[in-house]
Amino acid sequence: MPIASVESLRSVLRRGAVHAAPRLLGCVLVHRTADGVRAARIVEVEAYTQDDPASHSFGRRTARNEAMFGRAGIAYVYVSYGMHRCMNVVTGAEGAGEAVLVRAVEPLEGIDLMIAARAWQGRPLRDLANGPGKVCAAMGIGMEHNAADLLDEQSPLSLRPGDPVESARVAVTPRIGITKAADWPRRFVAGGVERRA
DNA sequence: GATAGGATTCACT
DNA sequence: GTGAATCCTATCA
C-alpha cells in the first residue's frame, strides 16, 4: 500500500504506532537549515504505545512526554542518558500517547553536513546514522524540534512520503537497548538484514 | 532539596 | 566485549 501524499501519511499515522511503524520505513525525513538541506530515508523504527511499560507515555502524562500525547504527525524529541537525543513520530489519536521511535536512517542528501555535525572520522557510511542518538546528531535535530509538525511542508523539519518498503522485506524483531518489555516484537527494520549488537 | 535511573554511544582492552 | 561519560526528569523525603 503506497503512501502517496502527506494527507494519506497523516491518516496512516492516526491509526496508531504499530500500524504506522512499518509504513514509515522508506519515508524521508527532511531538515532545512541555514547550512543547507539534509534528507534521509527511514530504515529502522520502533513502536511505542501507552500500554507498553517501556514507553514514556506509560502511566503518567507529564511535561516531558506531553508532546507524545499530541496529534499524529508531530515530533517527540527527548534526551536519553543525558547526552543523546532521540526522535519519535507521534501517532494515534490525540491523547493516545503512541509514537514511533526513529532508530536509523539512510543518508540521501546533505551527507557532508551530517558528517560535519557528527565530527565523522572516515568510518563506514552505514554507521553514520544507525542509532537513535546518531539520527538526531546527523540530522541536527534537537529539543527545539519537540512538538514540531512533521507534516507541515513549511516546517524546517518535515516528513515526506517515500518509496514504500514491501512488507516482505520488513523484518520484525524484539527491541534494543531497553530494560522493560524488551522482547516485544515492535521493532521494524527495512531489508531485514540490519542488526545491532 | 536530593537522588536514582534511562528508548545510548564511543573508546579502550 | 566491557565500561565510562553525562544530564534531564520523576520520585521520594
Image: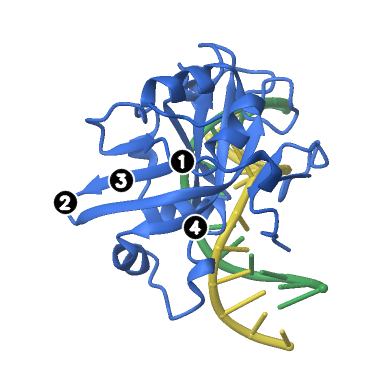
Chain colours: A blue, B yellow, C green
Q: Mark 1 or mark 4: which comes first in sequence?
A: 1
Q: Count neighbours of disc 1 (C-alpha within 10 A) and say few if under 14, some if 14 to 19, many if 20 or more.
A: many
Residue A76: where, in percent of width, then height?
47, 32
Q: Who is closer to the viewer here, A132 or A21?
A: A21
Q: From the viewer's perspective, is residue A2 above or below residue A129?
A: above
Tell me the mark number nearer the camera, choosing from 3 and 1.
1
Tell me the mark number nearer the camera, choosing from 1 and 4.
1
Hey, what amino acid is under mark 2?
Ala
Hey, what amino acid is under mark 3?
His
Residue drawn at 26 percent across, 32 percent down? A155
Mark 3 near mark 1, Cβ–Cβ under 8 Å? no
Residue A134: mark: 4
Residue carrying label 1: A27
Q: Is residue C13 left or right of residue B11?
A: right
Tell me the mark number nearer the camera, choosing from 1 and 2.
1
Q: Who is closer to the viewer here, A59 or A163?
A: A163
Q: Tag 4's secondary structure?
A: helix
Q: Mark 1 or mark 2: which comes first in sequence?
A: 1
Mark 1 near mark 2, Cβ–Cβ under 8 Å? no
Q: Is residue A59 left or right of residue A81?
A: right
**The disc numbered 1 marks a residue on which chain?**
A
Residue carrying label 2: A34
Residue carrying label 3: A31
Residue A36: where, in percent of width, then height?
20, 55
